[in-house]
Amino acid sequence: MNTALGFRNEVVPQITLVVPGRWHAFDLARELEQLGALHRLITNYPKSQTRRWGIPDAKVVSLPVSDVLTRLAWKFGGEAFAMRQQFRINDLFARQAAKHLGTPDLVHAWSAAAEPALLAARARGIPTVLERSSSHMLEQCRLLREEYASLGLRWEETPTATVERELREYQLADRIFVPSRFVRDSFVARNFPEEKLFLNGFGVDLGRFTPGEKSDGIFRVIYAGSLSVRKGVHHLVRAFKKADLPKSELLLVGRASAETPKLLGAADSRVHCTGHVPQSELPVHYRAASVFVMASIEEGQAMVQAQALACGLPLICTTNTGGEDFLALDGEGREILPGVWEYAAGFVVQPRSPDLLAIVLRRLASEPGKLATMRSAASALARRDLSWRRYVVANLERYRTIAAGAMESIYR
């Protein structure tokens, strides 16, 4: 371990991150670097991307082959083909990454591509953390399988090899970091020991996502993410149409999939799809909206929810999105209807409940005073508790505890 000023004048553990992609790992790496705790970032992104997060080239190991293969699989084979190749591509990255861990005090690796790194670290006596940003793999598969079946759609099953690797990773890691109570509870429901789980909700870039003045009189409902079954877009569209609000529109921001047309249902001039929007442009859309809705069937903790709150949008989400953890930072909610909980900055509803979503939308649309109060609460909440620095400092405290425990066991 190295000593770095600025972190309680204590020894700061050096962390190697292993991530096939970006996710929130680049935000974590940037903050760790600023706190003197980043040993190495191993990713399949090129360094031209990691530089945008202020991560020094010298601390980045870029293994881009798997990223190129993933993009080619999606482009030429489509989603189903890409899913079938998922394990092979992740395995290629995982095996390469395990050779570049360096000499850290702890390895933090993302699930589905962590096993080789976890094994290599264990062989060298280095403690490990597994990042699982979605629900327990078996729960995730169950929820999605059931939802697709309810719509008469075929779900492209997660490759068996991926599922089996994830389950092995759960056992190999010293701790599993999870972002929400929903994810934690999915592990506990599968008889995983709760003491091996560390719950720490994600953050948001509070410099980029800021409130703004809404300039029109349209009650605009916004969602950002893929237009997929997993995200519950069909429930959101149905809720919006059922609410039938005057002077309203639903803005769906994100990539369409093969299943999207069925999820949208009959054409409605008030429902608009933007297609993919770069992260840099999202704040403009958030500031033009009235409320953000996340109707997902299964999430870990969708970060677009924190982005929306930071832009001053009340959040309406299901219990399966991790959004409830954001809202609960202001105190636990009160149940105002069976399956509906009200918080200072939004509402939480049971999943698969378009009727309940419609009720909440009508309430906010018809009570401008409540809408304004919730907008203020959302902005205040984000600035008080949702910075990436808060998230990373909490991680770092836990890293130190894990690393210190490993050292004690060596010398015991």
Image (cartoon, rainbow, N blue to C red):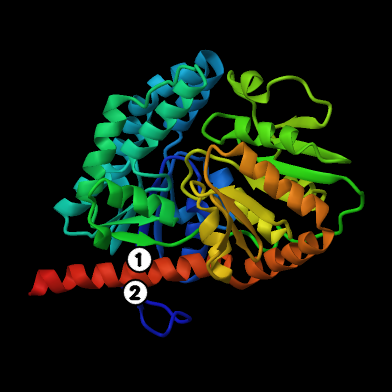
Pick the residue in front: 74 or 253.
Answer: 253
Q: Is residue 112 visible?
A: no
As drawn, the residue found furthest toward the left would be 412
Q: Can you tell which mark lies on residue 14?
A: 1
337 w.r.t. 34: above or below? above
Q: Name the residue under label 2.
A: 2
In primary-sequence order, the first of circles 2 and 1 is 2
Q: Can residue 75 be seen in this view?
A: yes
Residue positioned 39% across, 37% down in the render: 140
Q: Residue at x 43, y 70 (%)?
A: 394
Task: Tell me the amino acid under the disc marked 2.
Answer: Asn
Q: Where in the figure is residue 13, as x and y percent of width and height?
A: 34, 70
Decide which of 237, 230 is in the foreground and name it. Answer: 237
The spot of residue 263 in percent (x, y) is 62, 24
Question: Residue 330 at what x, y percent from top left?
Answer: 58, 70
Crowd class of label 1 (few under 14; some 14 to 19; many from 20; radius 10 Å): many
Count of number-bearing discs? 2
Q: Is mark 1 on a helix, strand or loop?
A: loop
Kind of residue sitting beneath label 1: Gln
